[in-house]
Every structure is written in structure tokens, then in C-alpha cells.
Image (spheres, rainbow, N blue to C red):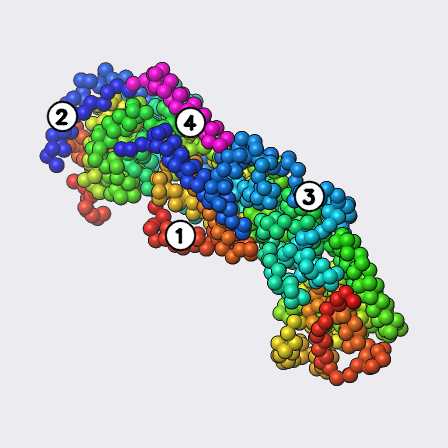
Amino acid sequence: MSTHETSTQALGSREKPAKTARTVRLNVEQASFAYAASAESAPTFTLGATSFQARERELVAILGPNASGKSTLLRLVSGTLAPLSGRVELDGQETSRLDSRTRAQRIAVVHQESPILYAARAGDFVLQGRHPYGRALRLATTEDVAIARNALAQVGAEHLASRTIGELSGGEKQRVILARALAQQPRLVLLDEPTLHLDIGAQVELLERLRQLAEENQYAVVIVTHELALAAEFADQVVLLHHGTCLRVGSPAAVYQRELLEQVFEAPLDVELGPAGRPRVHLRAGRTEDAT
Amino acid sequence: MKFKTRPRASDSANAGCAKTRTAALRLWLALFSWLLFGIPALAQTQTVNAASGLQDAAPVSHSFTDEIGRKVEVPTVVKRIVSLAPNLTEIVFALGEGDHLAGDTDFCDYPAEATQKPRVGGPINPNLEQVVALAPDLVLATKAINRRETVEALARIGLPVFVTDPHSVDDMIASVEHIGNVLHAEKTAAPLVEDLRERLSNIDRRIAGALPRRVLFVVWTEPLISIGRGTFIADALRRAGARSVVDASAEWPRVNLEEIVRLQPEVLVFASAHAGDTQHDIDMLRARPGWRSLEALRRGNIVIISDAINRPAPRLVDAVEQLARAFHPDSFARGGSRATPAYFAVEACACAR
Amino acid sequence: MRPLTLKRLLWTCGALAVVLLACMVLALNLGAVPISVTDLVLNLGRVAIGQSDQLPTEYRLIVFDLRLPRILLGILVGAALSVSGASFQAMLRNPLADPFILGVSSGAAVGSILATLIAPRFTLITPLGAFLGAITTIAAVYFLGRREGELDSTTLLLGGVISASFLSAIVMFLMTALTGRDLRGTVFWLMGDLSTPIQPGLQWIFSVGLLAGIGAIYTTAADLNLLLTGEREAIHLGVDVTRVKLVVYVSASLLTGLAVSASGTIGYVGLLVPHAVRLLFGPDYRLLIPASALCGAIAIVLADTLARTVAAPTELPVGAMTAMAGAPLFIYLLRRGMR
């Protein structure tokens, strides 16, 4: 835990002076969306106008309980959906208007785990990340192989290159999937609930790695999560969603207000400010006990 | 470890490499497919275009039209015949051309010499290579048993195939005549044909005026299958002075046993190669529901005819004769015994006399 | 890391092609009529240089008019079924998918029966009717399998399986309700039969269709590798999933339609050959597709050779051979976990 604190502190101290110099990568401006069964029927779910920005080397957490619209917002950011109103721009270009090849070269999305059917090797799996750059059969060039190796090294999985995906543990698989995303050499990395199947140690390790990668490769990273503690510790910005409405956008300290969090997550919570200005969230002991 | 800044994938050298690679791949694929398909196909067009047929030394041939309307070029001298159906084998032997039979099917069992001939497989799927290897001057087929694809395949290679298609007893006799012509065996065909026709008109005379017996021809008991009105078996029954109670257009109709009980046929006819087994089976039937309600079964009005009835060949006339005696014993001079069941085994073949 | 290289691709396919040629020579050699290998090679050479009239007539007829077309047909059918099976396994993300799973073969059977009834004299009618039946089924199942405007794997699978059952029931009804004469050939053909050579003109059409179908699917080979890891994942890696699914669906169904029109339903090949190839050469579709085509061809040539020599002169149906060899192989693969 102590190393964790130190690294957070170190990052925290590095954060402040450099912040204003970083370019805005992702600009989400009043983006909204509505799902409806058909054009005439009433929408079944609406995501209200949301705005936030993600800069390079920054980690943004889209936070909220289930069914709050996080996945919808992620799909708007990734360009899978076009916003009903407002704009979603990556480096000035609308994500939904990019052709799929360019989009794959700029945005990498890491999903919750899908079952992988056949015994592919981890190395070949990571090479798939080079798909947006190739043509026809996309036989790997030496450059592709180098990039893939590099990606594996960056996630600390270089030794897994010849192993079959099926043999890997959950954490190792997660790293290999992340490596594939890195092999795309994107500008923006999106992760949808990446910590779902991981134990706490692996969760922390993943988030630390993400911060590190963002720093080294100048990515903007956006993760969708409902893990309050992780978002508090690692995010530079938090976008708080509740029932399709964006309630607040800002640094964790600014967003983590007790009443707000209790209302959104419907749980008795305590918030206190930890070292380096990061909030710590506690579950209040018993319902009957009053908060101090 | 610092990840170096992204090199642009539009590097022209890389793109060039990729282009030559896909081009090489395409070229290789094209070459390979030409090798795989081109040479054999080339070979084939050559052989198909070449003069087909095995008649190396028989330039003279006659043109016949077979019973399904196909034009067939048959050499003047037919030394080697391949028969693709048992009834055709019987006809060939009946015409005295048994020595010229070069091959027949696995099911050709009459006369006994037929079993000694080289086999070409079953009638539905004969081994085409074997047929060709026997170097026949003529192949005989019948529409009822052989497949159109077999006939077409042999014809395409250049073998003359004569197809028969008898639907009645008279048709069968006509087939004997046609095959006699094709084999240039008119000398043996004519008396045979005349004899068969005479015997049939004899039967017609004797049973003229007698009421046709209502019969059920049983092909199979479970499920109950009889014969359709367009089959030669139905015609044979008619010529023998009987009428099938089943009137269906399908060749082998499945019949409802209850319907048969309602119709109460006078006589049940079974065809069998082994009378003893069939007799046993029939005895078993007496106890079965439905069957035991049949008057004919209870009274023992059963005729077991040899399986010659199943083949449109000269023995069919023998079968008709014996059926006629069984159905109308009073019409025949010697009078048949009324004691049934009667079993008629066709011993002698209707050979050329 | 050992990624697939062009060199490895070409060498593997080359080696398999050599094996296929060897099997072809073996198959030409064996049969009800024995032929020696040296004679055969000499004669093949003579044919290649255009001196075919120097060969003895029966020999020429047996080998070049009967055996060789049969072997070629076997190659076409084997390649078509294997590639189709491999493609459906990727598109439906289901290791149990085979070429007939979407009902194309049952539709072809209905088509050929109806065609034979309508025009029994027309020689091309069986394969033509089968092909039309196949195409109609492809279109029908396509519309059944759509959700929100694009092909959805689960819906497609359900639609296909239901269509297959329905059409099989129609086939049974037609066969029992109608006069049996011309249908005997159809029944036989349904079992899977290479013994009757198809018209030479049709062979060219089939060859072209086969190459076109395999070629079309091969253009999506790299995409299929990605599609197997998940549709969303593939979309985010730049794959046009809608287009890929459509191309694969139409091409694989057409390949199945061609194979069934030519030779009826030969089972197990489309299911097992891709799995065997995966075991041998890995799951990369850029190698799997050509390797499956070649291995499928090898499998059918060998099975057909067995079918016509094991109980000579009686010919066993090819489908029986593939089933007898296929079932134990299937069990073996199951035990290995079909990974």
C-alpha cells in the first residue's frame, strides 16, 4: 500500500504544473442519445446532454451505477453511435463520422471479456491489433511484429507471447487484451468495466499500468466503471452519471460529495479527503448508526 | 520502456512490400488452380471430342428407337451384351443369346447360368468402370429399375444403351420382340413371341365371361403395400381374370389395412421365392388384428405365386397362367383343386422351343 | 512469436497440393479395373502433350471419361464443403456448424425433387433444380436471420435450423406421396453420390463457382480471425462486420449449394476437416481456408476411392464412408476438447 501511496503522490505532484500544457484529445460537447424501438415510439432510455473533455495523458472515469448510461456514453465516444444532439470529437473530428479503418487507428476499445473460441496464441492475438493498418491478408510485417512485441512488453506480458489464450489466467488474459489495444497505436483508449473479473490486487495493478501507459504514450484514457474507490484513486476526472443524466464532471474531490454519491449509489457512504487531495469513500457501518 | 512515436503506416516501402506479396500470392493461386483443373480438363476435352465408342472394327450399325424414345445406334453384330436388370437377363437367355451376355447385375439369378456371369454391381448403382471394362456392344436397361443418370452417363461415353419400359404383359412381350430385333435374333424371337401371345389369348378365351375375382396383391405386410394400377403386375392380374381391390396411381401404394378389411378381397396373392417361409409368415398373420378379420385369410383363399410375377420377362406368362388357374379353376379343362392355399412354382423357363 | 508468413502459407499449401496430387494418382490407379502406376503416369503425360488417341480405347474411357471426372468432382465437392463448413464455424462462432446447418441442402433436395417431377426428361434438371432450391433457401434464411437490418448469428442459426427441419419434412412428404419411379434416383442422390459423372459443361461451371466462392471468402480471412474474438471487438478493430457476414453467408451457402447439386449430401466432411486442419496447422483463417479446401479434397478423394473399391463391383455411397471414418474422428476431437 505504501508504494501505491508514493506513486499516487508522485503522480499527483507531477500533475499540477503540466496540466494546462496538455492538449485536449477528446471533446464531448452536449452529447445526448435516446434508444427507441422505432421512430414513432417513445424512447426507452435517454442519455441527457453530457459534456466533458479528456486530455492526453489523462485518465477519465465515467462513473455510475448499473443502467446509468455509461455504456451508451462509451459508445458515443467510440463512434459506434452518432449523438442525437451535440458533438463527440477526437482531435477535432467527429468520431461517428470517421471511417471504421481510421477510427480503429485512433480509438482502441477494450471490452468485457468475450469467450474466445479457438486456441490462438497470445502473440497472434496481439497482432490482430495491427489489423487497421494492413491490407488484404494482413500478413504481419516486421514492423507489426515489433509493435506487437512492444505492446506485450508494456503490459509486462512479453513472456506470454507463445502461450495459448486458453491457458492464461484471468489477469494474464486481461493484459494480453490490453496489449492488443495498445498495438493499435491509438490516441484514445476506452475500457468498459475492465476490473469486473479481477481481484483487488489485479485491479490496482491494471489501473496503475493504465496511468503509466497514458503517461508514456500520451494516450487519453477513458474507463467506464462503477468502482468508487478506484475512480477516486486513479482518475484525473470523473463524469458522474445517474439514470441517463450527467450529474457532475470534475476532479474526484469535486465530484465525490456525500449527499450526491449517496443519492446516486443508494448506499450509506462517508467521504473523506485523503492525502494528495484524493477522496476516500467508506461504507457507513450500520444503517441505524448515524454518520459522524 | 518508452514506446517510440508511432511510425506512419503509409511508409511507401512497406506498402510496396505488401503489394508485391499479395501479387505473388495471387499469381501462385492462379498457377495452382490451372494445374489442378486445367490439365485434367484439357485431357477430358480431348477424349470426349475423339471418336467415342468401342466399336473399333464395326463401322456398320443400325439405328433403333428404344422404348422411351431414344435413338440408339447398335452394331450389326452384337457379340457382347451387358444387362442392367434381372428381367432383361432372363429375356436375353430366353432369346438364346445367353452366350453373348458379357455381364449382369448382382440380382440376376435366373436362369442358373446368369449367376456365373461377371457382375457389374446393383441395378441402381452399377459400377460404370466395370461396364466399360467388359467392352459391351450393347447395354440393356429398363426405366423401372435403372436410373436415368446411369443411362445418360453410359450413353455419353459412347456405349449404345437400349432402354425398355414395359407397363403391361403385352408390353413385356413387345420388349422381347424389340430386344430380339436389336440383337438381330429375329429367328429365335419370333417363335417365342408367338408362343407367348398364343398362350395369353388361350387364357383370355378360357376365362372370357368369368367374373373377375377381387384380389389383394400383397407386396409387403408391415406396412401394407400393394401395387398400383399402372404396373405390369396389375395388368398380369387382369389377364389372369382378377382385379386388384387397390386402385392407386402410385407404383407401390401404402394401403390402410382397415380399408382392405372393408373391401374384403376374395383372394390374397403373395409372391415369393421360398414358399415355405411365406407359408409360415401367412400363418403368423392369421392371429394379427385386422388381418384376422379378412375372410380370405380365414378361409384360406391364398395364392402364393413365384416371384416371376415381379419380373417382366417370359416367365411372367407362366405366372399369369397359373394365377388364372387358381382364380378360375372351372374354366380350365383339368379343373383345379379347390383346396387352397395353392403354391405355384415356375420351374421351367419359357425357353425358345 | 511466430506469425503467419507468406512463405509458411505457400509451403503448407504446396505440400498439401502435392499430397492431393498423390491421392489423385492413387485414385486413378485403383478401381474395379486395375491399372499400373507407371502406365498411368506415362499416359497422363501423353494426354498432356495431346497424344491421347494413342491410348487403348477402354483404358482411355475408364480412366479419362469415368475415373478422372469423378475424382475432379470429388475434389470440387470436398473443397467446397470444407471451406463452407469452416466459414460457417467462424460466422456463427459455433464449432458444431457444418455446411448444411442453415438448411441449404434440404432446400436443394426439395428443389431437385420438384424439378424432376416437373420436367423429368430434361437431363440437366436434377442439378439445376437443386441449385435453384439452394438459392431460394439461402435467400429465405437470410431474411429470417436478420435483426435490425443485419445478420445476427443466433437468429440466423435458429432460422437455418428450423428451415432445415421444415424442408426435410417436405422432402419426406414428397417422396412418400408421389409415384416412386423417377424419385429413386433422387433418393440415391440424397445419400451422397459421386458415381454418376456430371456433364462436362457443368464441371466448368462448378470449378469457376468454387474458385469464386473460395476467393470471396478468402478476402475476408483476416477479418474472420477477428470476428472469432467477438463482434464488437472486430468492429472496433476496423472490420466491416455487416459486409463480412453477408459475403461469408452468401459465398459459403453458394458453395454448399454447388456441392449438393453435384453430389447430394455428403456428411461430416464440412464439419470435421476444418477441425482437423486447426489441429494440424492452427486456427488462423488465412491458412485454414486454403488448407481446408485441399484437405477436404484429399478426404473426399480417399473416401470415394474406398467407396468404389472396398466391395467392388458394388459401390457404397460416399456419404457412408465419410460417416464411418468421421464418427470416430469426431469422438476423438471431442475428447481432445475441440479447442
| Magenta span main SS | helix
Q: CA distance from mark 4 to mark 1?
A: 33 Å
Residue B133 drawn above or below residue C14: below
In this figure, which residue is indicated by the disc labeled 2?
A10
Magenta stretch? Answer: B7-35
In the image, farthest residue toward the front = B57
Which secondary structure lies at badge 3?
Answer: loop
| Chain letter for mark 2 | A
**What residue did someone put label 3 on?**
B57
Badge 2 density bin: few <14, some 14–19, many ≥20, Cα 10 Å: few
Lower sequence index among marks 4 and 3: 4
Q: Amino acid at mark 4?
A: Leu
Counting other residues with Cα less than 10 Å from the Cα at mark 1, is it few (<14), some (14-19), or many (20 or more)?
Answer: some
- Badges 3 and 2: C-beta atoms under 8 Å apart? no
Q: Quadrant of the N terminus of chain B?
A: top left
Residue that numbered label 1 is attached to: C329
Query: Could you tell me residue A166's position as x and y percent?
Result: 29, 43
Q: Position of residue C320 (x, y in %)?
A: 50, 54
Circles 4 and 3, Cβ within 8 Å, touching? The answer is no
Q: In whole angstroms, how far apart are the C-alphas of marks 4 and 3?
A: 52 Å
